[in-house]
Each structure stands twice: as structure tokens, then as C-alpha cells.
Image: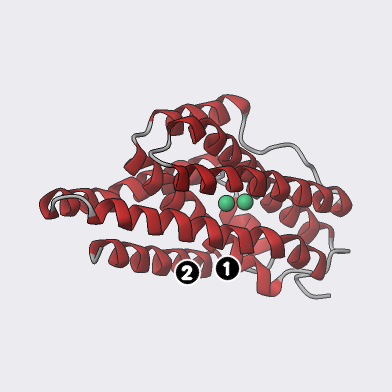
Amino acid sequence: MNGSDVTNTQYRQAMGSLLALYTQVDGLIGEVCDDRLGRVPDAAARAALAKQVVDERRHVEIQEEWISRLGTDPTPPIPAPAAEAIRAYFAELPWLEFLADLYLGVEALGSGAVEEIVPLADPGTRESLRVPLADEADHVAFGVGRLREELSRLEPAARRAFVRTLPARLDRLAGQIRALAPALPALFAAVGVPYAAVRDAVVARRTTLLDTLAAA
Ligand SMILES: [Fe+2]
Ligand SMILES: [Fe+2]
């Protein structure tokens, strides 16, 4: 029996828990984008966020359907008050900070972690992640592209000052995610993905993103 055998209860429970977290975050991102729709700077941003709201809803449907077939606990792992705090946090962010936190901190780095699951996952899980991860790549392309564009319009000193704030912003977000989901290292390990590999992949992606933005 290998690690990605869905008849293995421990694997199935761990994968279900990871997917339940991803699904809940997708739902929250969709709500955060929906809430932002009336306050974006232009029609291009409105179109991208409106598409994303639809995409995230579809991801939630796909994942919920697969989690129910896995037969694992579908309870959203982030408690309601913390989920509400996440909505409120994003609702308050100015546009540049919104782009940074949502697209770098959550979409790019979060989907980087989810992608680590795919190669070793069972076929049903892999299939359930196919459409969502393709869409996440679109969302990241929009968010990072838009952030670069906004930064290129700033005075060089203001641009450098903003880029310098990013590592601390991303550290803080990562710390909050770890606090909300302390079981993540054990869950990844239980589906055959060493957490160190996830961390290395996320750190590498983060470095690439920050380099791209520093050069904007
Ligand atoms: Fe998604
Ligand atoms: Fe997304």
C-alpha cells in the first residue's frame, strides 16, 4: 500500500482535511473579491475580480463534491470568528496592500503549497485540483501583473519603500496561516509530502515573486 491509497484511512482523513482547508480558503477569497468589486480602481480590475468570484465558487463546488466522495469530515477547519476576521481584514486594506496580501500571500504562495500535493496524490484528488489550480494560476497572473503595474506608476522611492514592506507582510500572513492550521505539517506528511519540501517550494516561489516586484 503506498501513501496515496484512498483506501488507507489515515491518508484519506489527512487529504480530506487539507482539501477542506483549501476549500474554505477558496470560499473566503471569493467572498473577499465579491466584497471588493464595488471599490476597484477600474473596469479591468472589476472584470478580473468578477471572474474570480465565479471561479472560486466553482472550486468550492468541485472540492466539496470530492471531499464528500472521500467520505472525510467536511467541517470548515477555520472557526467562524477567525473567518470573519479574515473578511474584515481584507475589506479594510487599501488597493496595493489588498493586491499584495491576496495575490502574493494567499493565492500565489497558497496554491504553491497545494501544488506540492498533486504529484503524489491519488487520481481523484489530482483530478479535483486540475481546474482549481489552473484558475489559481490565472488569478496570480492578474494579481502579480496588476501589482507590478501599480508599482511602476509610483515614484521610485515610494516603490522601493512598498517593496521593502512585502517580506514582513508575507511573514505575518504566513504566521497567521500557521496559527490557524497548526496541523498542516502533520497533514502534509500523512499524504506523503514532507513539510520541508512544501516550505522550500513556497520560499522559492516567494523569492521569485519578490525579485519580480523589486524589478518592476
Ligand atoms: Fe480557488
Ligand atoms: Fe484563486
Asked whether 85 or 136 is in front, the reply is: 136
Q: From the Cβ of disc 2, is ligand 2 less than 8 Å away?
A: no
Report which quarter residue 146 is drawn in.
bottom left
Q: Residue at x 53, y 55 (%)?
A: 139
The colour scheme of the drawn protein is secondary structure
Question: Which residue shows up at 57% across the image and 31% down it?
Answer: 83
User: Residue 189: percent from the left, percent from the top?
Assistant: 63, 63
On whether ligand 1 comes within 8 Å of the CB at mark 1, the answer is: no
Q: What's under tag 1, amino acid-wise?
A: Pro
Residue 194 got which mark? Answer: 1
**Alpha carbon of mark 1 to alpha carbon of mark 2: how far?**
11 Å
Q: Residue furthest left?
A: 157
Q: Quadrant of residue 193?
A: bottom right
Image point (52%, 63%), residue name: 112
Q: Quadrant of the C terminus?
A: bottom left
Q: Between 179 and 137, which is closer to the camera in this rendering?
A: 137
**Disc number placed over residue 89 in the picture, else none:** none
Estimate how packed mark 1 is, as few (under 14), some (14 to 19) or many (20 or more) residues with alpha carbons within 10 Å.
some
Q: Which residue is mark 2?
A: 201
How far across and how far down the image is residue 123, in percent?
80, 70
Quarter of the image that includes the N terminus: bottom right
Examine the image and state in which quarter residue 82 appears.
top right
Going by the numbered disc 2, the residue's amino acid type is Ala
The answer, for residue 109, to whether it is visible in the render is no
